[in-house]
Image (cartoon, rainbow, N blue to C red):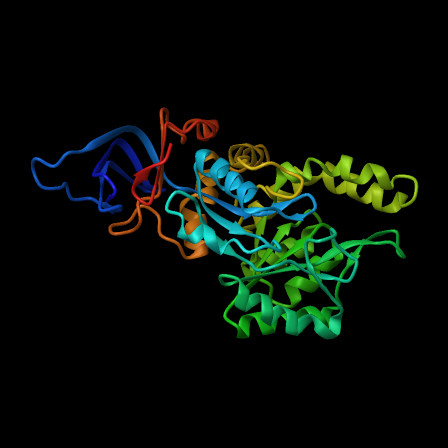
Amino acid sequence: MGAPVLRVRGCVLVGPEEVRDDLWVIGGRISFTPPAAGTDVLLLDGWALPGLVDAHCHIGLGPHGAVDRQEAEQQAITDRDHGTLLVRDAGQPGDTRWVDDREDLPKIIRAGRHIARTRRYIRNYAAEVEESQLVEQVRIQARRGDGWVKLVGDWIDREVGDLAPSWSRTAVAEAVAAAHEEGARVTAHCFGEESLRDLAAAGIDCVEHATGLQEDSIDTFAAQGIAIVPTLVNIGTFPSIAAPAREKFPGYHRHMLDLHERRYATVAAAHEAGVPVYVGTDAGGSLPHGLLAQEMAELARAGLSTSEVLAAATWGAREWLGRPGLVEGADADLVVYGADPREDVSVVADPKGVVLRGRVVR
């Protein structure tokens, strides 16, 4: 059975500068031309946005690694019901290609599996390699993903007793070059200061968390257009992450608390300098799904305006990821709200209707 003909009426936020009174969904796709007279139409009233984008999400990942299909399905449904219709899956070990065959589940852009230094990341998450194997593994994951590769840029080094880069600057440069040769962009998990400079020198495209940004690296990121996905909800858990290490690794403990303390100021400084910022929850692993509204609120707390937060979760994010928004002929992926999200970004926590591939799924 085909998708119904829908009319979304009220205030359709096509883009930051384009607002329409309505749009139509015909054959599952967006149209700005009404259907033929006499067509049965389902009406949705409210404020409409393009389907929200979670630019750092892990559908298929749990605290101990890959989860079964039933749990991954529930993760995807939870995100969908909160309005997230496009996910950049920033690394996970399982196979979620089956999601692509489900018309009722969000679209996923995959980064393959995390690539980490041996015993320098969460157990069962990453392909763990040494530097001599890094380029080969990057090529493997580039071919496994959907145009992204995910490195683990730093993690606690128990010999140092603190965060430390996982790779030498030379190895990172070779890895990024290899990914680019494969047609993939590169992102990296990074908490500390030092690895950010190495990643920028290598020409990386994006950094997750990026809590260690400082004035010099912020300037570099801005000049090179390197995006960040701050995952502030996750950064809020740094004190609990660091607490078990307080006695054995006091330097690491203090460092993590410092990064946590200045998290909003770091994002604000990066944003003010012109570093592109996108919304990502880091759901999966230790965090539940459905957190996008909370993450958007955190970015507002860090100083982004409501319109900037909306762009980071909709128009801007879709353009960055090469996916369409509310344009003629595109899949009708949109969320309808009962109030204006431009006036209060918290509105996105309570969708009135969710339309995915032209079908009302919530």
- Residue 18 drawn above or below residue 45: below
Q: Is residue 120 left or right of residue 187?
A: right
Q: Is residue 248 left or right of residue 289?
A: right
Residue under the point 88% across and 51% down? 161
Q: Is residue 164 left or right of residue 44?
A: right
- Could you tell me which quadrant the N terminus lies in? top left
Q: Is residue 133 left or right of residue 58?
A: right
Q: Nearer the viewer, residue 37 or 267?
A: 37
Q: Nearer the viewer, residue 234 or 270?
A: 234
Residue under the point 45% across and 55% down? 321
Residue 284: give x, y in percent of width and height: 61, 43
Q: Nearer the viewer, residue 71 or 211?
A: 71
- Outermost residue toward the right in this view: 247
Q: Nearer the viewer, residue 262 or 298?
A: 298
Residue under the point 62% across and 69% down? 138
Residue under the point 85% across and 38% down? 244
Residue 252: give x, y in percent of width and height: 84, 46
| Number of marks present in the image shown | 0
- Outermost residue toward the left in this view: 37
- Outermost residue toward the top in this view: 338
Residue 204: give x, y in percent of width and height: 60, 63
- Could you tell me which quadrant the C terminus lies in? top left
Residue 36: image quadrant is top left
Residue 62: image quadrant is top right
